[in-house]
């Protein structure tokens, strides 16, 4: 359960979120809105990347600000640009790096990394230079580096923005098959047909919160 209770946030004098109250138990939830609507700021509060200046956020009853380590064990975060998350020379090393605090031996970390890469179609790239992968492969690699930690929740901040149509579809299919609760920030509205819930933000406030059909109809009306 993800909860936002009276959440607000300001960067200096610029208010980007106001009076957000949400309870999110659903398996697939999307945040949509125009640029600057506050959707990415809201998503980043789930694992403590951004702290609210008003109200509080709870993840399974834990505060990401005060109990950040415990929350990050439950929540994986995927950024728009996978290059910002890839830190090791090869794909296998990058995924294994996520397990550096797991207590596993080096061989066990490498084995776990290989298993996850194989599961998501990158099994032949374990020794491949990570930054020489294609854009779609890099985003899958960043996803693998999160999934190897077996989080309960995966927050994705516009993960398909830099992908072509084929890789967008492939990535969306991969997300759909995951057991984790997924919170997706996106402009790709065609990805949301199978979602349980869509939250629409405008000027820092929730203006629609419904099933994809009516929520997206409200969003399209806003931007028309």
Image (cartoon, helix red, strand yellow):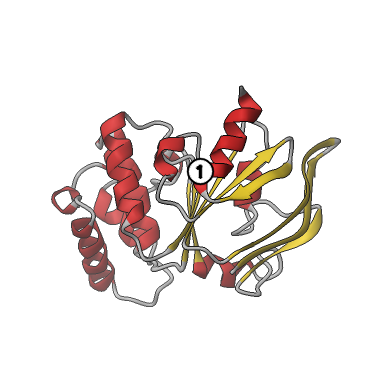
Residue 101's x, y, as percent?
Answer: 43, 70
Q: Quadrant of residue 66?
A: bottom right
Residue 35's x, y, as percent?
Answer: 62, 30
Residue 200, visible in the rendered structure: yes
Image position of 117 with respect to 125: above or below? below
Residue pushed farthest left? 124
Image position of 36 with respect to 199: above or below? above
Q: Nearer the viewer, residue 125 or 56?
A: 56
Image position of 105 with respect to 91: above or below? below
Residue at x 50%, y 43% (from the top left corner): 213
Q: Nearer the viewer, residue 133 or 210?
A: 210
Residue 88, visible in the rendered structure: no
Q: How many marks?
A: 1
Residue pushed farthest right? 13
Residue pushed farthest top? 224
Residue at x 33%, y 76% (from the top left corner): 104
Q: Quadrant of the N terminus?
A: bottom right
Q: Quadrant of the C terminus?
A: top right
Residue at x 29%, y 55% (from the top left corner): 93
> Could you tell whether 141 is left or right of 12 in the image?
left
Q: Nearer the viewer, residue 90 or 216?
A: 216
> Could you tell whether 164 is left or right of 47 in the image?
left
Residue 113's x, y, as percent?
Answer: 26, 62
What residue does disc 1 label? 213
Q: Quadrant of residue 65?
A: bottom right
């Amino acid at each position: 359960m993800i909860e936002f209770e009276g959440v607000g946030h300001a960067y200096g004098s610029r208010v980007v979120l106001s009076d957000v109250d949400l309870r999110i138990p659903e398996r697939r939830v999307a945040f949509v809105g125009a640029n600057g609507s506050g959707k990415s700021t809201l998503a980043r509060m789930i694992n403590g990347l951004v702290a609210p200046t008003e109200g509080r956020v709870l993840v399974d009853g834990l505060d990401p600000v005060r109990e950040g380590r415990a929350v990050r064990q439950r929540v994986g975060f995927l950024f728009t640009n996978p290059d910002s998350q890839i830190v090791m020379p090869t794909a296998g090393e990058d995924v294994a790096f996520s397990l550096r605090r797991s207590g596993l031996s080096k061989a066990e970390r490498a084995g776990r990394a290989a298993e996850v890469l194989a599961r998501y179609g990158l099994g032949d790239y374990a020794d491949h230079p990570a930054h020489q992968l294609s854009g779609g492969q890099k985003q899958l690699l960043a996803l693998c580096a999160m999934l190897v930690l077996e989080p309960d929740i995966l927050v994705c901040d516009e993960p398909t923005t830099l992908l072509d149509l084929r890789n967008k579809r492939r990535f969306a299919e991969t997300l759909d098959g995951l057991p984790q609760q997924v919170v997706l920030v996106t402009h790709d509205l065609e990805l949301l047909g199978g979602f349980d819930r869509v939250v629409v933000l405008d000027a820092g406030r929730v203006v629609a919160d419904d099933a994809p059909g009516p929520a997206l109809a409200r969003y399209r009306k806003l931007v028309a």
